[in-house]
Image (cartoon, rainbow, N blue to C red):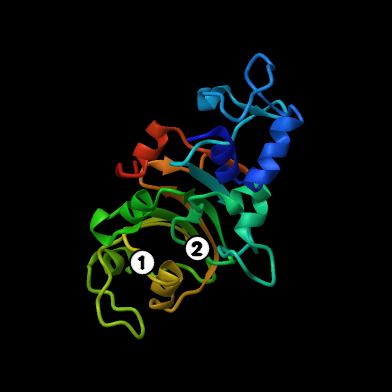
Amino acid sequence: MKLVKLIANLGYGSRKDVAQLFRAGRITDLQGEVLYADDVVPHAHIRVDDEPLDPPPGLVLMMHKPLGVTCSRKDPGRVVYDLLPPRYGVRTPALSSVGRLDRDTTGLLLFTDDGALLHRIIAPKAQVTKVYEATLAQDLRGDEAALFGSGTLLLESEKEPLAPAQLEVLGPRQARLSVTEGRYHQVRRMFAATGNHVEALRRIAVGALTLGDLPPGAWRALEADEVALIFRAAE
């Protein structure tokens, strides 16, 4: 692929815009030598305004989604794409969130432009574990772990019971819940089925990939070995 098309597909502008970047000498190699549109250069050696070129297609990002931000491209309020460089919103192929976290849920959110990988992660048969920490309005009753792990819990307005989920009690009103499904507001509805209310909810892991010390609003690209962690059981 010609450099003009490659760089345009990464969202740096139209092909005309990128051609102007070349003419202005703003696209260089590692040594600062000006590149031309027909040059053949390894992706990792390309610089735009002395900054590394964004990762090629196959990109996977992790973000610490903050409170009050919506997993949407269009919303009256702030959306997760506002936290990324504007060009990430116009990449080709498009960068999409892998599932969603609601406005009031924080924590680990994944993005990718790899459609096959996205569907592999969210497919029910993959049974990728999502781990959440919840702060509750009332003390736990004591029977939640058995109920959630039974595989018989039926959420309101649904016809199929939930797959077994694992609950770890962290305190009277604190719990860690591991689920393998991604139904609408699932964790909140599970606790609602016990007569409780989730006051704060944070996703801390997807598979064995953890949020770590990534601060709210921050994001970073994942390496291949980190992507592989998604499909490993959480420890």
Q: Residue at x 23, y 58 (%)?
A: 125
Mark 1, secondary structure of its residue:
loop
Q: Quadrant of residue 130?
A: bottom left
Tag 2 or tag 1, which sits nearer the N-term? Answer: 1
Residue 73 % position (x, y): 59, 64
Q: Point out the residue furthest to the bottom here.
A: 157
> How many numbered tags mark residues here?
2
SS type, badge 2: loop
Q: Position of residue 230 (x, y in %)?
A: 36, 44
> Residue 111's mark?
none
Q: Nearer the viewer, residue 230 or 167?
A: 230
The kind of residue tagged 2 is Arg
Residue 77 in percent (x, y) is at 69, 68
Real-space CA distance between mark 1 and mark 2, rounded to the nearest whole angstrom: 11 Å
> Would residue 28 be visible to someone looking at this image?
yes
Which residue does the image show at 42% across and 74% down from the upper left?
189
Furthest residue in direction top, as rendered: 31
Crowd tier of the residue under label 2, counting other residues whose Cα lies within 10 Å: few below 14, some 14–19, many 20 or above: some
Q: Which residue is the extreme one toward the front?
A: 38
> Residue at the location (50% across, 63% down)?
173
Front in this rendered view, residue 71 or 153: 71
Residue 42 picture location, percent across and down = 50, 23
Locate residue 185 relative to residue 20 in the image: left or right: left
The residue that disc 1 covers is 142
Q: Is residue 50 above or below residue 66?
A: above
Residue that label 2 marks: 173
